[in-house]
Amino acid sequence: MTMTITLVFLACLMAAVLWWLLRQSINVQPWSAGGAGQDVYAGVLARPPAKTALIVFLAVATSLFALFISAYAMRIQFGDWRPLPQPRLLAWNTLVLVLASAAMHLAVRAARQGAEARLRGSLVAGGALAALFLAGQWIVWTQMHAAGYFVASSAATGFFYLLTAVHGAHVAGGLVAWARTVDRARRRVPAAQLRLAVEMCAIYWHFLLLVWVVLFAVLSSETLGLAICTTAVRL
């Protein structure tokens, strides 16, 4: 029963992410494109190569996370599986990442409106909140380590560190691109020229949030039969 729930969960995850990526790739409807000869591929052809590359990268990253979760779903079936205490800070870290994604959304709106001051403020807030999320995750890892839960302690601890570390690495990579965009914004590059970079940062931040919501469910949702951590004991 648990395996069935897991497979359905993974199928829904992949369908949701692929649907979202498709919407990002094709956003021009043939009936509103302004020409009878245009078709649904017009949006793809007009899309900047950098954004197309980002979408391909997100598709690959989605597959990577899906494989990790699938491996976890198979490993949890063994009788030696023992869940970990649930760190209280995970919920707060989730809230911080939600706020980071919201700030990046506001940055996109500011870029489209040419509001350079709001753009810089929202952009800085989005990156700062993402960095705060990483700091919170580091505290969680420190708490786990101090409580005696090491990477090699058990299968559950191994998957906990693996999933959170891989996601954290993606957040850190996004902060590199974000720093370059902030640097351009501080040099007073016009909002119109920053729009593409800001939109790409926002897409990436929304993706990180989506992936983390799924991982948070895997880490803590005992009702799905997927939880790596148990709410019976908390750190």
Image (tube, grey):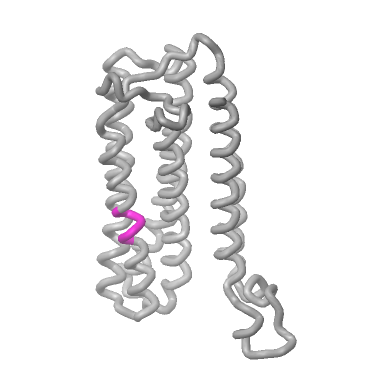
Numbered circles on residues, count? 0
Residue 100 within the segment the image draws in magenta: yes
Residue at 42%, 27% in the rendered image: 227
Residue at 66%, 81% in the rendered image: 30
Residue 96 lies left or right of residue 68; in this view the side is: left
Residue 193 lies left or right of residue 50; in this view the side is: left
Q: Nearer the viewer, residue 52 or 67?
A: 67
Find residue 171 and report its horizontal and vertical position in percent: 41, 45
Relative height, residue 47 to residue 202 (above, below): below
| Magenta range | 99-103
Q: Nearer the viewer, residue 25 or 213?
A: 213
Which quadrant would the N terminus be assigned to in this image?
top right
Quadrant in the rendering for residue 53: bottom right
Which quadrant would the C terminus be assigned to in this image?
top left
Quadrant in the rendering for residue 149: top left
Relative height, residue 92 to residue 222 (above, below): below
Quadrant in the rendering for residue 11: top right
Residue 122 lies left or right of residue 45; in this view the side is: left
Residue 105 within the segment the image draws in magenta: no
Find residue 52 and report its horizontal and vertical position in percent: 60, 63
Relative height, residue 134 to residue 16 (above, below): above
Q: Residue furthest bottom?
A: 35
Residue at 32%, 43% in the rendered image: 94
Q: Is residue 127 visible?
A: no
Q: Is residue 47 visible?
A: yes
Find residue 118 and report its horizontal and vertical position in percent: 26, 72
Q: For the stretch drawn in magenta, what is the main secondary structure? A: helix
